Amino acid sequence: MTTGEAPAVTVSETETAAAETAPPATVRGRRRREAVLDAAEELFLARGFLGTSMDELGAAAGITGPGLYRHVASKDALLMAVLDRIWADLKPAIAAARELPPDAALEVLLGAHLDLAVGQPGALVLLIRELRHLPGDYRARADRNHRRYVDAWVEALTGRAPGALSRGQARTVALAVHGLIDNAVLRGGPDRVAAEGQRALLERLARGALEAAVAA
């Protein structure tokens, strides 16, 4: 994953914003909250964080008046909650990678990164474009999450072929693979291949880059 400076995800525990409002207690409430976040993601993508008002966000989610504040405390908290879904989606892969042999860990990490980039490109756009508008403590959390995510890749890469890569080289390889995937998805344009074909192509390219790095 790439951001304005460089964030992504977590090795042991994913840090989130601990969203200023309690999570919904019911399945219906959780589904409603996800619908709110989906609507917010679309509107932030279309208009930008600064160009979007809480009234517009509420209308997009089908909520009028102060109802939106039952789900989030502020526009900042809403964007944080949208971005936190990235960390939540990647957390299982990071946790699994810690318990797996290096080859299997790398498979899990690569699969999770492809799933995120191809399946949720909008979330990546917001992470890159809008993170700078959020409070410093949240940006610091994002930076820590990114370092931990990259560290998970470094552990898998260095364990896969001991002595073939230094930790610094493994970090460079991980970031290069992330950049290859993210940039191809985010800059592919309207004529880019269908998601299934795109994912398969990017997987082949990423595997080639990983093999070349170890062979070198």
Image (cartoon, rainbow, N blue to C red):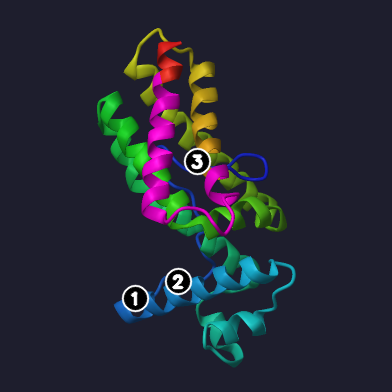
Question: What's under tag 1, amino acid-wise?
Answer: Ala
Residue drawn at point x = 50 percent, y = 24 percent: 173
Residue at the bottom extreme? Answer: 65
Closer to the chain start, of discs 3 and 1, is 1
Q: Quadrant of residue 6?
A: top right
Q: Which residue is mark 1?
A: 25
Q: Quadrant of residue 172?
A: top right
In magenta segment, residue 6: no
Q: Residues within 10 Å of mark 3 (few under 14, many from 20)?
A: many
- Of 171 and 191, the residue lying toward us: 191
Discs 2, 1 touching: Cβ within 8 Å:
yes
Q: Is residue 179 left or right of residue 32?
A: right
Question: What's under tag 2, amino acid-wise?
Answer: Ala
Q: Which residue is mark 3?
A: 181
Closer to the chain start, of discs 2 and 3, is 2
Q: Quadrant of residue 179?
A: top right
Q: CA distance from mark 2 to mark 1?
A: 8 Å
Task: Point out the stretch of residues depicted in magenta.
Answer: 183-211
What is the x, y in percent for residue 166? 48, 12
Residue drawn at point x = 46 percent, y = 59 percent: 85
Q: Which residue is mark 2?
A: 22
Q: CA distance from mark 3 to mark 1?
A: 36 Å
Q: Is residue 211 above or below residue 181?
A: above
- Which element is circle 1 on? loop
